[in-house]
Amino acid sequence: MLVKLYELPSLENALATATMQGVTVRRALGPERPVVVAWVQSNFATSAAEVDIAWCHLPISCFIAVRGSRILGFACYDTTARNFFGPEAIIPEERGHGLGRTLLLAALHAQRAQGYAYSIVGGVGPAEFYAKSVGAVPIAGSSPGIYAGMLRPAH
């Protein structure tokens, strides 16, 4: 899906809503890499490698949502390919309260600040979520796209 970064909803409003829920959404810090990657590995294992790559960029291209010292979710960009958004995930009990949208907006606004005009949602899961949250539109003929032929763990 394609997102126009020059027409994004307000990040400030989304952050304020998260704050009212006792949640901080922020860019991850360098020393947090092992903690965040381990958390992703144990909660969303298929995303761990991409999240780990986020620390190869400066600024780090991973945002986290935390309540106190508890991680609730994450969103990354520029991990599989430049200008790609994702992966993103929220723990099940925190879904439906706007946290996914806030993390999405934090990452997309960061891409905009780095000079991108558009972002590509690579491995689209909930297409309706992206369309509703940021006006994302499908890119015709893009599936499986960059993921064609990707090696996967044997089961």
Image: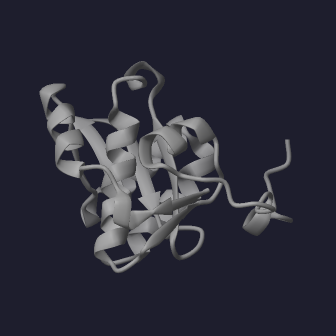
- Camera-side residue of 119 and 66: 119
Q: Nearer the viewer, residue 101 or 51?
A: 101
The part of the image, by quadrant, that contains residue 63 is bottom left
Q: Position of residue 135 (x, y in %)?
A: 48, 49
Residue 112's x, y, as percent?
Answer: 34, 70
Location of residue 6 by image quarter:
bottom left
Q: Which x, y percent locates residue 105? A: 34, 51
Q: Report if residue 68 is visible in the image.
A: no
The N terminus appears in which quarter of the rendering?
A: bottom right
Q: Which colour scheme appears in the figure?
A: one colour
Write the residue at 77% across / 65% down.
145
Residue 31 appears in the rendering: yes
Give the number of callouts: 0
Residue at x 51% of width, y 72% of height: 83
Query: Is residue 36 rendered to the left or right of residue 45?
Result: left
Q: Is residue 101 above or below residue 85?
A: above
Q: Is residue 145 left or right of residue 82?
A: right
Q: Vertical placement of 146 versus 115: above or below?
A: above
Tell me the residue at 35%/46% (across/down).
103
Q: Is residue 85 above or below residue 91?
A: below
User: Quick one: quadrant of the C terminus?
Assistant: top right
